């Protein structure tokens, strides 16, 4: 009889709305930022990723939970001086070659710098590669001079150097965005 009571309690717990909420707790938006007008000649036809004046952009202080196979979206970014990063990497205040497998993580996964200079394993396109976390892509702020008038990052993106894309065997024509999984190495 005691086993039936424990079994009934277990079933009651797993079907409880509170249990399901905690187990499947998602990262919810933390706010919005309003786009500001970039300085003249800052954004042009080739650089249409800047914030749009008056548009609201969602911000996140968190990212989806990290597991042994965390889902994310890989995107191409540069870490060289004059590249996409615009500034040295946050972890070591250095620029990094596009030939080095390095990544940036959104604010939640960056975890206040706790993943700085640690390796993560990225899997996609049927292959895996290890890369070093060197930077944060701010998902909690954006659309201002400090963020080069770029919108906040999505909370599930991994910005990767060309070396990562090459190691994953993604054809050059398909570089840009790729569904991936990743984990701490």
Image: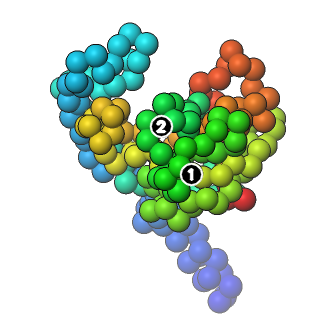
- Mark on residue 85? 2
Residue under the point 43% across and 13% down: 46
The CA distance from mark 1 to mark 2 is 11 Å
- Tell me residue 167's x, y (percent): 78, 36
Residues 54 and 135: in front is: 135
Residue at image mark 1: 134
- Tell me residue 151's x, y (percent): 34, 34
Q: What element carries label 2?
A: loop
Q: Residues within 10 Å of mark 2 (few under 14, many from 20)?
A: many
Residue under the point 44% across and 62% down: 112
* Residue 84 higher or lower than 114, as above or below: above
Figure quadrant of the N terminus: bottom right
- Asked which quadrant contains residue 177, the reply is top right
Comes first in the chain, label 1 or label 2? 2
Q: Is mark 1 on a helix, strand or loop?
A: strand
Whether residue 22 is visible: yes
Residues 146 and 120: in front is: 146
- Mark on residue 6? none
- Tell me residue 64's x, y (percent): 51, 52
Asked whether the beta carbons under mark 1 and mark 2 sit within 8 Å of each other, the answer is no
State left or right for residue 114 relative to residue 145.
Answer: right
């Amino acid at each position: 009889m005691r086993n039936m009571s424990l079994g009934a309690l277990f079933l009651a717990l797993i079907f409880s709305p509170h249990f399901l909420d905690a187990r499947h707790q998602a990262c919810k938006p933390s706010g919005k930022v309003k786009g500001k007008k970039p300085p003249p000649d800052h954004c042009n036809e080739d650089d249409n990723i800047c914030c749009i004046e008056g548009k609201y952009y969602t911000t996140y202080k968190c990212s989806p939970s990290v597991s042994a196979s965390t889902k994310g979206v890989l995107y191409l970014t540069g870490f060289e001086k004059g590249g996409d990063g615009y500034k040295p990497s946050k972890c070591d205040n250095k620029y990094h070659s596009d030939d080095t497998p390095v990544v940036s993580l959104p604010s939640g996964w960056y975890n206040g710098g706790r993943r700085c200079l640690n390796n993560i394993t990225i899997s996609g396109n049927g292959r895996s590669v290890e890369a070093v976390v060197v930077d944060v892509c701010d998902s909690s702020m954006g659309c201002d001079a400090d963020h080069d008038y770029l919108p906040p990052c999505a909370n599930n993106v991994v910005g990767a150097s060309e070396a990562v894309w090459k190691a994953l065997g993604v054809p050059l024509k398909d570089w840009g965005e790729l569904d991936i999984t990743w984990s701490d190495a």
